[in-house]
Image (tube, rainbow, N blue to C red):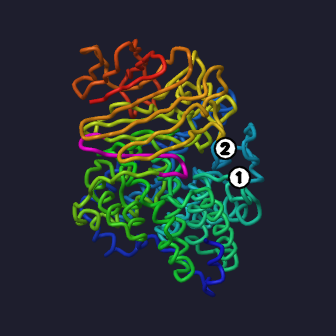
Amino acid sequence: MFTERLPLLPAVLPAFRPCPPACQRADWESLPDTARQRLLDAGEAEAARSIAPMPLTLWLDFIRSGRRADWEEATFSRRARLCALVCAECVEYRGRYLDAIADTIWAICEESAWQLPAHNSYVRDTPQLPLPDTARPLIDLFAAEAGALLATVHFLLGPELEKAYPGLTTRIEQEVRNRILTPYLQDHFWWMGNGNEPMCNWTSWCTQNVLLCFFLLPDVSQEERRAAVRQAAYSLDCFLKDYGLDGCCNEGAQYYRHAGLTLWGALHILSSAAPEAFGPLFREEKIRNIAEYILNVHVDGPYYLNFGDCSPLAGRCGAREYLFAKAVGSPSLAALAASDFRADPDPDHLTAQDASSRINLWYRLLTAFTQRELESHPDTAAPAGDVWYPSVGVFAARRGSWVLGAKMGSNGDSHNHNDTGSITVYKDGRPFLIDIGVESYTRKTFSPQRYEIWTMQSGWHNLPTFDGVMQLPGAEYAARDIQIGEGSISAELSGAYPPIQGLSHYRRTVSVTPEGITLVDETDWPGEVELTLMTQLHPQLWGGGLSLEGLGLIQPGSGVEVTVQPVPVTDPRLRTAWPDTIWKISMYFYNKLILHLN
């Protein structure tokens, strides 16, 4: 798709202009007052803080203990600080923030490495090296983010910084060249694509930010830009090959922000430089379907149907989704993005669980300069209809106050949990049956021990367990014989489990009507099945079933034994979505269970 457009490249690839530079005062002064004040407030808050220290022992914490959070918080806080200070200076333009900006730029330039300790390896899926090799820069997600950040600062405030600190812009150019431009053109990192090797959000995410470096810095030659475009085109084709025509993101709604939206970012930069070559790609069906995925898995308010490592609170839509919608011609997505933006108390995502949303300066600029359009867009957002994504096995249906989600694919997805056949349920926009998501990342999260983590196991999803035997990871462990009906889905789930003596059949059928959800599980296994149901609401016995704090009822048929177990939630990442206690319901039955949620 991308590489076939390369013969249409123009003779000259111009620089990219993400917004007006700071010296164009009329543009900055015409921003909405609320946007200007928001940016000033964030800058003031950061100016009052000191730059986070990043000693060697903090880097080694990952190697010694597997903990990632402290190093990452220090790294991200530096970049978020620079974003906020630069935006405040661009709004005020009095030089009041320049010293703090220069100090932060200098600190980032002095870092021995821009990659995370958890990403410090040159070969995919190999152990991380203890220390970074300063002679061989490595481009990971956050090295690319750091390069894009410094390149954007250079674009916005280059003359002002050079006047106040002669040589600082040269230092920015040297560091970005040494750590991003040269390695990108001379080395091969796994996320750049290699034939049929599977890619993930890294490909579009890194590519977008590398392109910002090549098209924002002034000392990049035409030859280098053309080489970068050729490599980016190949990488994006490698990324797209792993998507079905339906556009489903197999990493979930949260990762759409790093996959689908960074695909938009890369294509936006490319089409700005070469509109005739790349602009028409926005009209491709697959690109439009990728854009609209987030619309189709939206539940209500901040909630999304989630699976794998994705949180149900995947982040509000905003400027990027809106601009993607405009580019592909999706009024429904544009309406959702505008409505969500207006409901978002934190449109720059300064307090978001996902730090990457607050360390990208371009995203803040897009939000500020698109705000008027977002605020004036007609409030025509409407819930999506039923959707079936065969490429991943994701199903969603809505009836009345009920929303049903089902994962009927395989256990071979990126950021996979063993959750084939699991369902999530919402009523009145509130979680009814939940998918827990993932705890804070550690070394174990992306290691051969991944499925020792409880949240990854099928026994902690809305699924059956057979005498302690749970599902296994891998694409071969999948749902079969999937049938889609009006508001219903049915599939054979026995193939998601290892061979179990006596088990050849476990069929799940689930449907939604305005009155509620009906789940029917049938099996030939001769033993007692334990069906797990996860909820954030305290289940109370009521009339032979369970009441979920007034939201609704879970009613099994007769002869079903039910137990309820509290599950403490202590992990900081999980606590962003759930209360301090969630609940595991176990239902024990033989052969057939009919369950009503109403």
* Residue for point 38% across, 12% down: 559
Q: Is residue 133 left or right of residue 318?
A: right
Q: Which residue is mark 2?
A: 119
Q: Quadrant of residue 399?
A: top left
Q: Is residue 499 left or right of residue 209?
A: right
Examine the rendering and report whether any part of residue 240 can be seen.
yes
Q: Quadrant of residue 237?
A: bottom right
Assess whether residue 82 is covered by the magenta stretch: no
* Residue for point 34% across, 15% down: 558
Front in this rendered view, residue 129 or 314: 314
Q: Is residue 266 above or below residue 456?
A: below
Q: Earlier in the sequence, mark 2 or mark 1?
A: 2
Q: Which residue is mark 1?
A: 138
The magenta stretch spans which residues?
A: 389-402
User: Residue 366 at x, y = what percent?
Assistant: 40, 64
Locate the C terminus by quadrant: top left
Tell me whether the residue at label 2 lies in contact with that at label 1, contact meaning CB atoms closer than 8 angstroms: yes
Q: Is residue 21 above or below residue 58?
A: below
Rate crowding at label 1 as few (under 14), some (14 to 19) or many (20 or more) other CA atoms within 10 Å.
Answer: many
Name the residue type under label 1: Leu
Front in this rendered view, residue 179 or 327: 327
Assess whether residue 398 is covered by the magenta stretch: yes
